[in-house]
Each structure stands twice: as C-alpha cells, then as structure tokens.
Image (cartoon, helix red, strand yellow):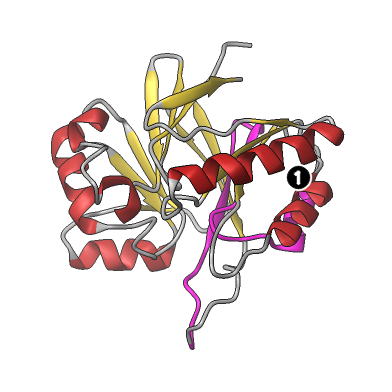
Amino acid sequence: MRAMKISKYLHSCLLFEHEGEKLLFDPGKYSSIEGRVKPETFADVATVVLTHDHPDHLYMESLKPILAKSGAAVIANGEVAAKLRKEGIEAIVLDEGTRQAGPFVLRAIAAQHEPILSDTLPRNTAFLVNERVLNPGDSLAPSLAEWKGVELLILPVMAPFLTEVGVAAFARQMEPRRILPVHDGYAKEFFLEQRYLNYGAYFEKLRVQFHPLTEPGASIEL
C-alpha cells in the first residue's frame, strides 16, 4: 500500500497527498487570517473538499484565491454547494455515498454538527478517505461509531461545543489507531503545547498514537 501524506495548515485545513495528487480539506479563515498560510501553497491541489458552512471551514477570501491558482474541483454537500453557486463557484454535490477524486475515494457521511448558540445548525458532512482516515468535520455524532477502529481519526479538540472530557469520550468510542487533532486555530501556542502534552499522555495509555501538528505544513504519513 502506497503511503499517504497528510499535512496540517492550522485549525482544520488539511492537505492529503497520495500517488502524486493533492486534496485539500477546509481552508478556512483561521488558516489564512495571520498570513502564515498563503494561497500559492495550494496551487497544485486537484480537489478541495468542504465539510460545512462555517467561516473557519469555508471562507471565500481564502477559497477563491486557491481555486484561481489551482483550478481545483470542489466537493461539498448540497447546502455548501448552493452557497458557492451564489459566488460563481460550481461544486460537485456529495451529500452521502462515495466518489472518486483521483487516487482518493471519498465516502460522504451525514453527521450532525455539534450544538452551538444559534437557532440553526449547518449541514455537516463527515468524510472517510480511502477507508483509512475519518474526518468528521464538526461532529462527534454517535452514528460515526460505524467506523470504529479507523486507522486515523481527525479529531476536533477545541471549540465552544467541546470539553476535553467529551473529546476523550468520543475518541474512546471510535478506538482509532492514530489521532490527528484539529480545530485548534484560535489557541495560543503555549496553551496548545500544554493541552497536547495532556492529550498525548492520555492517549498513550490507550495505546493510541497522537500527532500534535502545530506548525503550518507539519505532516504525518500513513
């Protein structure tokens, strides 16, 4: 099995590389707002995948320059696709089921966004990549337990709707072999370091490998 490389570009922005092709998840506001991540970093991306309509995942001021430089195809659920269409961006709609994107097989899974202080929740779509990596977006839905034992879990660890106890409980439920923490773009570096030492020690006891990628472009391989 050929290696798949995953690089983190702050918060929930993830670049997958496999068999010479690149796929990008959620280039949101917290990745680009400080200028630490530039659109040209993604000039050779073939596909952009968006999990839901929140600015830390879908930010037009970040997305449009990336698409202009790369010409990438966009895959998103119907709600996100409708918003993009108003901005002149056509997206491939994938609410549920599978779709091939070069060497990547994407399985879209409806997974409810976690509760927030809003009258409405965006439609959140989790994605299973090549049956090896589960990116839940902003969901810890019990239904995701169908993919218990996944090789790598992309795990949101900081948000108004999260506690460390809740994060740990979801991870225990999922029993992944490895964890890549995300949704941490608004935390100070000293705080991230402290919390990731705590998470790392916790998951080590469970024999789960924890990968705290904090610098833009830091990566792991599967």
Q: Is residue 174 left or right of residue 42?
A: right
Q: Is residue 112 above or below residue 184?
A: below
207 part of magenta stretch: no
Q: Which secondary structure, mark 1? A: helix
Q: Is residue 102 above or below residue 68?
A: above
Task: State whether residue 5 appears in this view.
Answer: no
Residue 196 sits in quarter: top right
Can you give x and y, in whole percent of width and height, for residue 160 in the image? 54, 69
Task: State whether residue 195 appears in this view.
Answer: yes
Instruction: Say which quadrant the N terminus sits in.
Output: top right
Residue 181 sits in quarter: top right
How packed mark 1 is, by other alpha carbons closer than 10 Å (few <14, some 14-19, many 20 or more), is: some
Q: Residue at x 25, y 54 (%)?
A: 90
Can you give x and y, in whole percent of width and height, for residue 53 in the image? 39, 65
Q: Is residue 67 left or right of residue 101?
A: left
Residue projecting furthest to the top: 2
Instruction: Say which quadrant the C terminus sits in.
Output: top right
Q: Residue at x 21, y 40 (%)?
A: 66
Can you give x and y, in whole percent of width and height, for residue 35 in the image? 21, 42
Q: Residue at x 29, y 67 (%)?
A: 83
Q: Is residue 159 left or right of residue 134?
A: left
Magenta stretch: give its range. Answer: 119-146
Residue type, numbered disc 1:
Trp
Residue projecting furthest to the bottom: 119
Can you give x and y, in whole percent of width and height, for residue 51 in the image? 46, 55
135 part of magenta stretch: yes
Q: How many marks?
A: 1
Q: Is residue 142 left or right of residue 112?
A: right
Q: Which residue is mark 1?
A: 147
